[in-house]
């Protein structure tokens, strides 16, 4: 089983090739503005630099065209993880203004869409907010009839505001999605081509959290489409025929074509990948993990080899959602963070992928965290003479500032007063001090700079079922659902022996005839050795 | 001399945490009520808390609650106007104004409902309730245990439906009539229960429960800040007992007759590995069995909390895989009297068990 894992960060694009459980080769290249170029270079470097490749070339940095020669490499799957979508929310950029359509009046009127969003994010994303009569009761009866006319009026507002992405959330849509699908149909008639996110496709019971997930998803759809297409293009250019997967929040993968409609499912894939990668590389199963990237630093907690999950409610960029996600604290600090005010301020703004052009040690004019680290002798990168003129007290202040940020983040994620090991990974992990309060030791691992890509490469495959079972007892219905989910996971490439149930949920549907039960089951497993035979087309 | 103490928005944040723990799985998450309060405070509202002993004997107090299935409350979000209109409608029905407003149940979102009504109506909130926790039914109150009159009751929904239950033959009848109306409007409604005189509140309510919930919330918050185990902090501060810690292995739920009923199984972790804890609930956790033997039962408070954060977990948000701790907290003494147990003991929930407190 040969897999390539790629992590596209704001600053670097990392790629690793895994043969079974062995990291065969790893490369790190700068992320490019078009995304495609960075992946193409990474893949090319991976293919051409690999041990034993005839006439192995030095690292290729330039924008990639088609690979110089056909790759002599058979790859079973390419898994890409990206922090693009999270970064967009955290940094409040690349977000589209959306229209929020809430169906449920007269209920829920005092808490309109965006009510619990941080004000700055709401100001960027909130386009039109429309609250319409409609929605359902818990037993499937309508609350009041759906306001068809109001929906058409809303469409006119959406059109004249030039909004291209819409989130629709209706009261009790997980039980009865009729109002959401009706509203979507009207929207397609009145505003053809507008992207629609329906809340029932994303979430469960909990109107506000489900609506929040739909709003974030809608705000990210144009970016997701651009990104997924850039990934496919890069693969095509590299001449790899393997199927392309995007990694998801829970450490599993989805085919890219499916994943682009639901960017929120890829939200936390970065931290999940880096933590699973850190566990894989260090052999430790319990530790705090800190992943310092170019733009952000993620702190999480590893328990039994998996990221500790946040119970129930998870905040993304300050927005409450109900996703099953690792409990991660994101800090606006990375190797590309801007250093301002004589070293008093570091981040959250970052030069990101432009670090290799704009960073001082690389000949640019912007003072970054990396420049400070080079000046302090923490790492040797670029040309250190270019930072020789930095005042010593500025360097000291900036380092103190960064260390304080990291210390505070690690402290917040610790839930136990006892000392724990800290695994430092990521391209910017030289910013992590060697001694921190509450930390027994700081552990650095081989391939630490590409832990994310390793985590992507070892991502698991899932199988899911969400359907209504009639006239079966609860136990029988759940067992049947589990069997279907397991078959789907195996068909998708999972090794049957490693399958594990990660989610079981059932909701009785009292309004349907007979004994009706909606059952959702999700199972995950490692990718099996014979994936190439069982993989669906 | 009446002293009214203005309550800060930070205290309402603490109240939300504490009330959710006292909700013993039910009462509905206070989060949405808290969001409403944040909005109201942002608009300039300040609600005052009143010591019940400052009530005159003939003052009239409104007892309010949001009634229904917590699951429904997650979709049909609570609105201050609805609860305020229940109070106003009761005043119209009585032809007399209320001196203050109090909570029916301190557990869950209903701890904050009187604050929502008070903010709109400019009345103080009395530092008391009549459950000391959350319970699913109308006769499960200290007022019912003291045989106070159970009518009239006003029930309103968001659609301008309103019902006055003018008389009821018993607490059970009041429960049946109001529950039927509640189910008819979608298993969620705002209610103003039978009005209470100051004397009745002072003699028959559970006093000081609002400030107790605020303190409980503050205990959790300060444990988190100090990286102390919040579960341990609660057990210490409230004289509770940690009964079990593990991972949710199965949840079965059904929404029937306006309630959320079901069971949850927890597989033990750590020192409880290899053992299983089973919980039964009707909105709130009612009975817990350890390896098949009854371990804890109502009215002892059965609180299920996130093992790490100490956040309470409601019966509607229990999920497979959650790491939880089960803690018992002592019940208010009035619930433990023979009369109290008739109303809120295990038999009142259909379990043929002799009540045995874990604190006995």
Image (cartoon, rainbow, N blue to C red):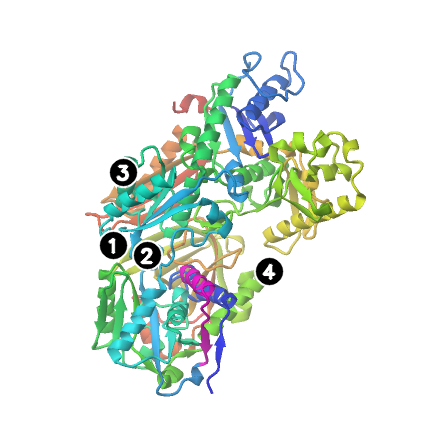
Q: Nearer the viewer, mark 4 or mark 2?
A: 2
Q: Secondary structure at mark 2?
A: loop
Distance (Cα) linking label 3 and label 4: 49 Å
Q: Circle 4 is placed at which residue position?
A: B225
Compared with A217, B151 (above or below) is: below
Corner quadrant of residue B194: bottom left
Distance (Cα) linking label 3 and label 2: 24 Å
Chain letter of the residue carrying label 4: B
Labels 4, 2: one chain: yes
Residue in the foreground of this view, choosing between A407 and A506:
A407
Q: Secondary structure at mark 4?
A: helix
Chain letter of the residue carrying label 3: A
Distance (Cα) linking label 4 and label 1: 43 Å
Labels 4, 1: one chain: no
Q: Circle 2 is placed at which residue position?
A: B76
Packing grade of label 2 (10 A; few <14, some 14-19, many >=20) is: many
Labels 3, 2: one chain: no
Residue A143's disc is: 1
Residues in magenta, as a range: B32-51
Q: Circle 3 is placed at which residue position?
A: A185
Distance (Cα) linking label 1 and label 2: 10 Å
Distance (Cα) linking label 4 and label 2: 33 Å
View extreme (front): residue = A160
Chain letter of the residue carrying label 1: A
Write the residue at 54% across / 15% down. Answer: A66
Q: Secondary structure at mark 3?
A: helix
Residue B99 position within the rendered picture, expressed as x and y whole percent measured from the top left = 37, 80
Q: Is residue B36 shown in magenta? A: yes
């Amino acid at each position: 089983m040969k897999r390539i894992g790629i992590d596209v960060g704001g600053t670097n694009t990392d790629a690793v090739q895994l043969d079974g459980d062995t990291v065969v080769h790893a490369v790190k290249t700068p992320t490019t503005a078009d995304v495609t170029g960075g992946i193409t270079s990474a893949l090319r470097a991976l293919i051409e630099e690999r041990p034993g490749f005839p006439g192995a070339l030095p690292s290729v940095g330039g924008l990639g065209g088609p690979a110089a020669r056909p790759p002599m490499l058979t790859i079973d799957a390419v898994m890409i993880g990206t922090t693009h979508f999270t970064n967009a929310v955290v940094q409040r950029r690349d977000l589209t203004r959306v229209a929020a359509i809430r169906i449920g009046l007269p209920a829920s009127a005092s808490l309109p869409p965006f009510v619990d969003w941080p004000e700055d994010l709401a100001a960027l994303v909130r386009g039109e907010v429309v609250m319409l009569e409609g929605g359902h009761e818990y037993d499937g009866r309508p609350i009041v009839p759906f306001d068809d006319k109001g929906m058409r009026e809303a469409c006119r507002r959406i059109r004249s505001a030039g909004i291209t992405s819409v989130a629709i959330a209706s009261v009790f849509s997980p039980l009865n999605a009729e109002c959401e699908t009706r509203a979507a149909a009207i929207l397609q008639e009145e505003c053809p081509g507008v992207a629609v996110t329906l809340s029932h496709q994303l979430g469960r019971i909990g109107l506000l959290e489900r609506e929040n997930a739909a709003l974030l998803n809608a705000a990210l759809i144009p970016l997701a489409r651009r990104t997924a297409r850039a990934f496919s293009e890069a693969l095509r250019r590299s001449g790899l025929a393997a199927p392309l997967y995007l990694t998801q929040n829970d450490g599993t993968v989805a085919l890219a074509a499916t994943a682009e409609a639901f960017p929120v499912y890829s939200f936390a894939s970065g931290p999940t990948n880096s933590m699973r990668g850190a566990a894989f590389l260090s052999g430790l199963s319990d530790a705090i993990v800190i992943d310092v990237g170019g733009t952000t630093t993620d702190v999480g907690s590893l328990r039994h080899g998996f990221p500790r999950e946040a119970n129930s409610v998870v905040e993304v960029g300050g927005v409450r959602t109900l996703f099953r996600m690792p409990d991660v604290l994101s800090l606006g600090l990375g190797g590309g963070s801007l250093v301002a005010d004589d070293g008093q301020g570091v981040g959250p703004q970052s030069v990101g992928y432009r670090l290799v052009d704009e960073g001082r040690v690389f000949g640019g004019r912007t003072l970054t965290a990396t420049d400070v680290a080079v000046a302090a002798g923490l790492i040797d990168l670029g040309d250190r003479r270019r930072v020789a003129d930095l005042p010593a007290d500025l360097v000291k202040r900036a380092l103190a500032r960064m260390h304080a940020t990291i210390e505070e983040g690690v402290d917040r994620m610790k839930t136990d007063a006892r000392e724990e090991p800290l695994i430092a990974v990521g391209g910017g992990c030289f910013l992590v001090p060697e001694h921190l309060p509450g930390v027994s030791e700081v552990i650095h691992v081989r391939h630490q700079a590409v832990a994310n890509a390793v985590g992507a490469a070892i991502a698991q495959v899932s199988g899911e079922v969400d359907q209504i079972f009639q006239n079966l007892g609860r136990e029988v219905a759940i067992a049947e659902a589990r069997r279907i989910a397991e078959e789907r996971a195996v068909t998708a490439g999972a090794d049957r022996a490693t399958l594990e149930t990660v989610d079981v949920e059932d909701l009785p549907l009292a309004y349907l005839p007979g004994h009706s039960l909606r059952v959702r089951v999700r199972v995950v497993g490692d990718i099996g050795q014979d994936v190439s035979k069982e993989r669906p087309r | 001399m009446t002293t009214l103490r203005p309550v800060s928005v930070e205290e309402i944040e603490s109240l939300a945490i504490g009330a959710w723990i006292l909700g013993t799985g039910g009462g509905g998450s206070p989060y949405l009520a808290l969001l409403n309060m944040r909005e109201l405070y942002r608009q300039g509202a300040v609600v005052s808390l009143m010591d019940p002993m400052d009530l005159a004997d003939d003052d009239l107090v409104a007892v309010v609650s949001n009634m229904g299935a917590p699951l429904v409350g997650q979709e049909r979000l609570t609105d201050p106007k609805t609860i305020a209109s229940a109070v106003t409608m009761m005043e119209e029905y009585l032809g007399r104004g209320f001196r203050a407003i109090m909570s029916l149940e301190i557990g869950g979102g209903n701890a904050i409902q009187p604050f929502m009504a008070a903010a709109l109506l400019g009345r103080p909130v009395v530092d008391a309730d009549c459950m000391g926790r959350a319970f699913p039914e109308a006769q499960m109150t200290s007022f019912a245990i003291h045989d106070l009159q159970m009518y009239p009751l006003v029930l309103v929904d968001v659609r301008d439906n309103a019902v006055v239950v003018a008389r009821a033959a018993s607490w059970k009848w009041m429960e049946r009539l109001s529950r039927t109306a509640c189910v008819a409007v979608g298993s969620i409604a705002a209610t103003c229960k039978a009005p209470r005189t100051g004397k009745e509140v002072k003699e028959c309510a559970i006093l000081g429960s609002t400030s107790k919930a605020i303190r409980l919330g503050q205990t959790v918050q300060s444990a988190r800040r100090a990286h102390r185990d919040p579960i341990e902090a609660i057990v210490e501060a409230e004289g509770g007992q940690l009964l079990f810690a593990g991972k949710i292995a199965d949840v079965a739920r059904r929404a029937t007759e306006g309630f959320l009923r079901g069971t949850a199984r927890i597989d033990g972790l750590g020192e409880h590995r290899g053992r299983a804890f089973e919980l039964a609930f009707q909105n709130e956790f009612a009975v817990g069995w350890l390896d098949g033997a009854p371990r804890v039962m109502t009215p002892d408070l059965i609180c299920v909390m996130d093992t790490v954060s100490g956040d309470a977990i409601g019966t509607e948000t229990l999920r497979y895989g959650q790491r939880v701790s089960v803690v018992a907290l002592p019940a208010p003494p009035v619930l433990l009297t023979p009369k109290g147990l008739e109303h809120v003991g295990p038999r009142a929930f259909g379990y043929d068990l002799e009540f045995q407190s874990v604190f006995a």
